[in-house]
């Protein structure tokens, strides 16, 4: 593909994560010539979603990537006397401390293959009975296409005459869009199922399960294409910046969403549902009548707290937890407001931050459902792809599995003028966007990274059983020891198109203090139990059973000043990876407030309306 690439672009984007994809779409929509490259074989970077065997292949690639040694730079001969090169790294060091455990029955046979798999490949799995990683089984490899079923379009509960308030989701396929809007000379998007993760219908498996409530490892593999497992676990606030961007840019036509059905709390060893709406509060049996009135009065104040400065002016220097103690709230209500509405901890937020978070929660209620949150069908990895699709529609060129060796910098102006790719081709551009993980250790020697602890579980039932088995839940488990952090738990059912029928996909996330397993395993043990043959027959088991588990640490490169990067040229912009927050506002703000103004504010055609730009500066920070 390299010999067909043009030698000059307006913008070159390296990495296909969410921030990079948003700015690539904006540039392409504004008429800029965009080259979007990624050394990976999939879209999204650390924002990606994988099928089950795709995730295992990703784990294997990560293991092999750690053994890569940077070869001697063969591109040095192309650097002129008045130029210097900034070498980019071939190693992805953003994922660490990976541990995989399989608790389901290991009745794997050679003829068991994932439905629709094209080829087989070895992958790494750790046995539940072993404490160290070991090659214990061989799993089929398949292309990264996603399983689909016909889903109902998401509609707002309250009709609105304003078209900007309606989230349109018609599930348009990108292949057709590309064929209609891009010719072969100006658009080189990847249309394979592996690259773009197109939604491919899959026939239902009619094989009878061998035993009631028994899910085997071979079943998980065979239904692996029904899994869409996110590397980063997030939700969308229904009135957040990303939803507004999706609607106003019309990118929402490429995606479908589902409302989070319930918010849970963990108290005294039990999981219970938290009332969200006014109707939920007054119908709740967990609250007394006095508590209901107290809660409604406090939440009404939070909606317009800025109008009553006397109520909080003397408390700015204390935590939100301490502030709640000064209000007329029972300990039960304090817990609900702190952990399930503001979604913070005893020490993490100030009074003002807690009030902003509570107001933002309440402001998002009712737009698309009974809770403030939405989840994209087929996983978070769909969001970067949606913006990539728009970029491709307007002429952006995409090259996966295409690495960049170095940035070429002019010594006099200290601006980047070109890149040199893996084939030795020099490609000139005016602006360059680079994902943080592509920079070398020398470039990032002054950067202090945080870490995110992540766990992904496949379980056999929900943490809180109800009449419906299609619940999408969010739960915050408070920290119990000093120096640790609250753990956010998001449980997805099969109707989100992220797991096979009869299972749940559970994501756990927190700021790292140790390895992911050390941080998250105590919470896992509180909520779940390992899946064993003895307990299959025991119908009295209250906790969900874990079929498969993955732990890993992910680098958090958000909110890092560009001055921390050594000798960064002025026309090179750094795009961070996912942060630990629940929403995606940090990624959108990064693009709106720093990158977008420097590249596109002189354009008469823009992706993002000025009203959204202004909103990004006054939106409450969570």
Image (spheres, rainbow, N blue to C red):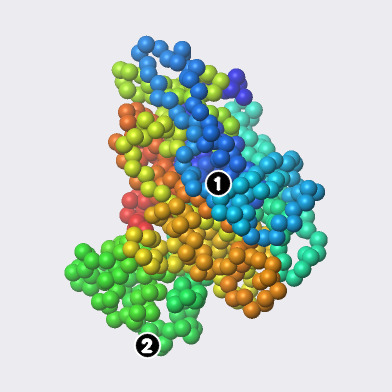
For label 1, the residue is 48
Q: Is residue 392 shown above or below 248?
A: above
Q: Is residue 399 shown above or below 503?
A: above
Q: Residues within 10 Å of mark 1 (few under 14, many from 20)?
A: many
Q: Quadrant of residue 206?
A: bottom right
Residue at image position (63%, 43%) is 57
**Residue 516 x %, y %:** 47, 54
Q: Residues within 10 Å of mark 2 (few under 14, many from 20)?
A: few
Q: Are marks 1 and 2 in contact (CB under 8 Å)?
A: no
Residue at image position (21%, 64%) is 317
Tag nearer the camera, 1 or 2:
1
Q: Which mark is residue 290?
A: 2
Q: Is residue 74 shown above or below 330?
A: above
- Disc 1 on helix, strand or loop? loop
**Residue 241 x %, y %:** 43, 53
**Residue 473 x %, y %:** 53, 67
In the image: residue 617, left or right of residue 578: left
Mark-to-mark CA distance, 1 and 2:
46 Å
Could you tell me which quadrant the C terminus lies in? Answer: bottom left
430 or 314: nearer the eye? 314
* Mark earlier in primary sequence (1, 2): 1
**Residue 428 x %, y %:** 46, 21
Is residue 495 something that shows in the picture? no
Q: Quadrant of residue 456?
A: bottom right
Is residue 74 something that shows in the picture? yes
Q: Which mark is residue 188?
A: none
Could you tell me which quadrant the N terminus lies in? Answer: top right
- Disc 2 on helix, strand or loop? helix
Residue at image position (47%, 39%) is 93
In the image: residue 113, left or right of residue 319: right
Residue found at the very far bottom of the displayed protein: 289
């Amino acid at each position: 593909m390299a010999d067909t690439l043009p030698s000059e672009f307006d913008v070159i984007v390296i990495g296909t994560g969410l921030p990079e994809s948003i700015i690539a779409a904006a540039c392409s929509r504004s008429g800029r010539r965009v080259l979007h490259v990624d050394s990976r074989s999939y879209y999204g970077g650390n924002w990606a979603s994988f099928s089950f065997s795709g995730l295992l292949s990703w784990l294997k690639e990560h293991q092999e990537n750690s053994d890569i040694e940077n070869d001697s730079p063969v591109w040095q001969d192309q650097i002129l006397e008045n130029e210097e090169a900034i070498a980019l790294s071939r190693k992805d060091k953003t994922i660490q401390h990976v541990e995989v455990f399989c608790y389901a029955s290991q009745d794997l046979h050679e003829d068991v293959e994932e439905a629709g798999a094209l080829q087989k490949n070895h992958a790494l799995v750790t046995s539940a009975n072993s404490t160290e990683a070991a090659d214990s089984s061989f799993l089929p490899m398949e292309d990264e296409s996603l399983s689909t079923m016909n889903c109902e379009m998401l509609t707002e509960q309250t009709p609105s005459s304003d078209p900007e308030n309606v989230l349109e989701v018609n599930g348009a396929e990108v292949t057709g869009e590309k064929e209609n809007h891009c010719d072969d000379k100006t658009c080189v998007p990847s249309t394979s199922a592996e690259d773009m993760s197109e939604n491919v219908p899959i026939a239902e498996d009619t094989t009878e399960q061998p035993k009631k409530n028994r899910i085997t490892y071979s079943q998980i593999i065979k239904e692996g294409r029904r899994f869409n497992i996110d590397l980063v676990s997030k939700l969308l606030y229904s009135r957040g910046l990303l939803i507004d961007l999706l609607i106003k840019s019309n990118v929402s036509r490429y995606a479908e969403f589902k409302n989070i059905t319930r918010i849970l709390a963990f108290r005294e060893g039990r999981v219970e549902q938290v009332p969200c709406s006014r109707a939920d509060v007054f119908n709740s049996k967990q609250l007394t009548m006095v508590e209901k009135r107290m809660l409604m009065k406090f939440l009404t104040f939070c909606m317009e707290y800025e109008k009553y400065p006397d109520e909080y002016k003397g408390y700015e220097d204390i935590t939100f937890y301490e502030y709640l103690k000064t209000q007329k709230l029972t300990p039960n209500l304090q817990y609900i407001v702190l952990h399930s509405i503001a979604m913070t901890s005893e020490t993490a937020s100030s009074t003002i931050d807690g009030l902003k978070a509570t107001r933002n929660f309440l402001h998002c209620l009712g737009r698309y459902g009974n809770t403030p949150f939405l989840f994209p069908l087929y996983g978070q990895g769909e969001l970067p792809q949606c913006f990539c699709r728009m970029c491709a529609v307007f002429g952006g060129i995409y090259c996966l599995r295409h690495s960049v060796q170095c940035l070429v910098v002019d010594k006099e102006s200290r601006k980047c003028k070109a890149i040199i790719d893996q084939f030795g081709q020099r490609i000139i551009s005016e602006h360059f966007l680079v994902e943080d993980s592509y920079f070398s250790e020398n470039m990032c020697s002054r950067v202090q990274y945080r870490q995110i602890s992540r766990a992904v579980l496949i379980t056999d039932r929900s943490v809180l059983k109800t009449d419906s088995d299609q619940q999408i839940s969010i739960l915050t488990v408070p920290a119990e020891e000093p120096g640790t952090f609250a753990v956010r738990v998001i449980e997805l059912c099969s109707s989100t198109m992220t797991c096979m029928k009869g299972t749940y996909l559970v994501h756990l996330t927190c700021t790292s203090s140790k390895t992911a397993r050390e941080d998250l395993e105590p919470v896992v043990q509180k909520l779940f139990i390992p899946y064993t043959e003895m307990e299959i027959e025991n119908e009295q088991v209250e906790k969900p059973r874990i079929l498969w588990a993955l732990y890993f640490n992910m680098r958090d490169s958000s909110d890092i000043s560009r001055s921390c990067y050594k000798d960064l040229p002025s026309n090179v912009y750094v795009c961070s990876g996912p942060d630990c927050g629940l929403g995606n506002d940090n990624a959108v703000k990064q693009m709106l407030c720093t990158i977008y103004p420097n590249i596109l504010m002189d354009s008469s055609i823009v992706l993002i309306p000025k009203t959204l730009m202004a909103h990004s500066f006054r939106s409450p920070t969570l």
